[in-house]
Image: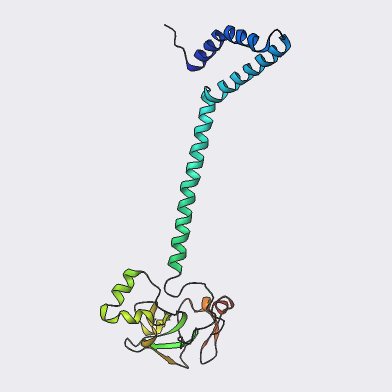
């Protein structure tokens, strides 16, 4: 028995319905043959359009491709948005945010470019950024500040490039204001110094223009 696909079946049904359709057209529109021909042509056009749109393999393939394309764009668009949000969130930690710090709060005692010495650990370095209060992942804050020192999180924190001359293992630090002492006349050696500063005037480092825009009052 020959195989009949959906398109062939529809065409067969349309042929079978031709006579009843002619009958109903004659009943509705009487003997006006021109009007019946016009309506018949419209019905044939609608049937042909329906066949091409819903019974064609190519039409369904095109619909599937369009759906897959929209799904792909939505999925990767969502991933890009989440990735961008995560990246922006990560860069807002540890005084790395590019948000302009203006006006400068009175609680911030020190300035970008000043050279510091850590009161407890003894290493020296230079301030490259600050936050009014600690901005870091919650896990880091919990590890850094046990319950007895939770109040320190709400004090100003500074991002430090650590002087390589100290031989200290880390290259950067994020420390509260209470651990900082300012010193003058000491130059800091660090591979990123030129990215942040253009020179040293003997008391503090001179910020690069991009950094000065972020800390205009330092």
Q: Quadrant of residue 121?
A: bottom left
> Residue 202: x and y, percent?
52, 92
> Residue 68: x and y, percent?
48, 38
14 versus 66 height, above or below: above
The residue depicted at 60 percent of the width and 22 percent of the height is: 49
> Residue 214: x and y, percent?
54, 77
Query: Closest to the observer: 21 or 53?
Result: 21
Q: Quadrant of residue 19?
A: top right
The residue depicted at 44 percent of the width and 92 percent of the height is: 183
Q: Is residue 218 left or right of residue 125?
A: right
Q: Is residue 104 left or right of residue 25?
A: left
Query: Closest to the observer: 96 or 123?
Result: 96
Query: Closest to the observer: 38 or 25?
Result: 25
The residue depicted at 33 percent of the width and 73 percent of the height is: 141
Q: Is residue 152 left or right of residue 186?
A: left
7 versus 132 height, above or below: above
Which quadrant is home to the N terminus?
A: top left
196 versus 181 height, above or below: above
């Amino acid at each position: 028995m020959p195989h009949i696909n959906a398109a062939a079946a529809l065409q067969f049904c349309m042929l079978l319905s031709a006579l009843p359709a002619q009958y109903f057209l004659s009943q509705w529109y009487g003997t006006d043959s021109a009007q019946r021909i016009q309506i018949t042509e419209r019905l044939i056009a609608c049937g042909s359009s329906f066949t091409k749109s819903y019974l064609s393999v190519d039409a369904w393939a095109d619909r599937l491709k369009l759906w897959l394309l929209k799904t792909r764009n939505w999925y990767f668009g969502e991933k890009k948005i989440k990735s961008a949000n995560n990246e922006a969130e990560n860069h807002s930690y540890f005084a790395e945010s590019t948000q302009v710090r203006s006006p400068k709060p009175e609680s911030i005692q020190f300035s970008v470019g000043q050279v510091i010495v850590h009161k407890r650990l003894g290493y020296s370095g230079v301030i490259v950024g600050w936050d009014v209060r600690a901005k870091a992942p919650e896990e880091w804050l919990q590890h850094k500040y046990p319950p007895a020192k939770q109040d320190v999180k709400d004090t100003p924190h500074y991002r430090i490039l650590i002087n390589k001359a100290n031989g200290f293992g880390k290259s950067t630090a994020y420390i509260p204001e209470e651990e900082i002492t300012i010193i003058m006349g000491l130059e800091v050696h660090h591979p990123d110094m030129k990215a942040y500063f253009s020179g040293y005037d003997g008391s503090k480092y001179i910020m690069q223009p991009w950094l000065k825009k972020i800390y205009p009052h330092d």
